[in-house]
Image: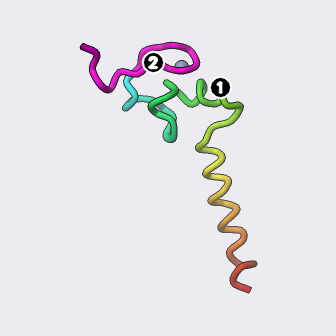
C-alpha cells in the first residue's frame, strides 16, 4: 500500500513526500513552488502575501 504522505505532483508527475514540498499552500498538489508557479503562472503564496500587504496598506485609509 502507498504511504499516505506520498503524492504525485500534478505538474511534473514526480512522486514526492508532501511534507517536504516547498510550496506552503498547495503541498498536496505540487512538489515544489516551481511546479506550482509553472502550473498556475504564480504561486498562491505570493498572492496571499500580496493580499496581506495590501490590507496593511489599506489600514490607515480604513481607520481615517
Ligand atoms: Zn512537480
Q: Secondary structure at mark 1?
A: helix
In space, the residues marked 2 and 1 are separated at their CA atoms by 14 Å
- Name the quadrant where ligand 1 sits: top right
Q: Position of residue 52 (x, y in %)?
A: 62, 59
Cβ(mark 2) to ligand 1 < 8 Å? Answer: no
Magenta stretch: give its range.
1-16
User: In the image, 10: left or right of 57?
Assistant: left
Q: Residue furthest left?
A: 1
Q: Position of residue 1 (x, y in %)?
A: 24, 13
2 magenta-colored: yes
User: Which quadrant would residue 15 be assigned to in this image?
Assistant: top left
What residue sits right under mark 1 in the picture? 39
Q: Secondary structure at mark 2?
A: strand
Is 2 rendered above or below residue 58?
A: above
Along the viewing direction, whichever of 2 and 51 lies nearer the viewer? 2
What residue appears at the point 75 percent right and 78 percent down from the top-left corner? 61
User: In the image, 12: left or right of 42?
Assistant: left
Q: Residue furthest bottom?
A: 64
Is 52 rendered above or below residue 62?
A: above
The answer to whether the residue labelled 2 contacts the one labelled 1, judged by CB atoms less than 8 Å apart, is no
What residue sits right under mark 2 in the picture? 8
Q: Position of residue 40 (x, y in %)?
A: 67, 31
What residue appears at the point 56 percent right and 15 percent down from the top-left corner? 12
Along the viewing direction, whichever of 4 and 45 lies nearer the viewer? 4
Is 8 rendered above or below residue 43?
A: above
Amino acid at each position: 500500500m502507498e504511504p499516505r504522505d506520498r503524492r504525485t505532483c500534478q505538474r511534473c508527475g514526480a512522486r514526492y513526500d508532501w511534507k517536504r514540498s516547498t510550496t506552503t499552500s498547495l503541498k498536496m498538489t505540487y512538489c515544489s513552488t516551481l511546479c506550482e508557479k509553472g502550473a498556475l503562472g504564480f504561486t498562491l503564496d505570493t498572492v496571499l502575501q500580496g493580499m496581506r500587504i495590501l490590507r496593511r496598506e489599506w489600514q490607515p485609509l480604513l481607520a481615517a
